[in-house]
Amino acid sequence: MLTKSKVLDALQDVKDPEIPVVSIVEMGLIADVQVEGEAVRVKITPTFAGCPAVEVMRVESERRLRALGVEDVSVQITFDPP
């Protein structure tokens, strides 16, 4: 069964391309994780609005979650909270 903890563990593999020794989880970029049955919704808040790596992190997060066998994945970028 998929859990929030398993999602966060998987996202530990997603590194910030600008600081590749740190995961997006470690950086505190994960604003929200929702697991509803076999669907996963993740919200990422970048460190600043003009972050050039945000799309890379979003795509890599989706790829990593799909590697867990999750087909219904949504990773959104949010600026709330700022």
Image (tube, rainbow, N blue to C red):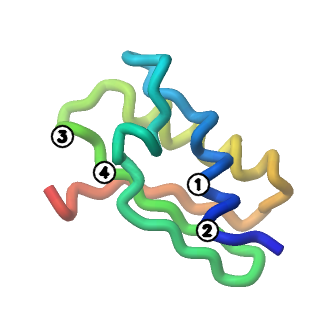
Are discs 1 and 2 less than 8 Å apart at CB?
yes
Tag 2, which secondary structure?
Answer: helix
The residue to which callout 4 is attached is: 45
Mark 3 or mark 4, which is nearer to you?
4
Q: Which mark is residue 58?
A: none
Q: Earlier in the sequence, mark 4 or mark 2?
A: 2
Left or right: 40 as drawn, with respect to 38: left
Check the image and report above or below for 38 versus 70.
below
Tag 4, which secondary structure?
Answer: loop
Disc 4 and disc 2: Cα gap in Å?
17 Å
Disc 2 and disc 3: Cα gap in Å?
26 Å
Q: Which mark is residue 49?
A: 3
Mark 3 or mark 1, which is nearer to you?
1
Q: Quadrant of the C terminus?
A: bottom left
Disc 1 and disc 2: Cα gap in Å?
6 Å
The residue to which callout 2 is attached is: 4
Q: Quadrant of the N terminus?
A: bottom right
* Type of the residue with mark 1: Leu
Q: Residue at x 55, y 68 (%)?
A: 41
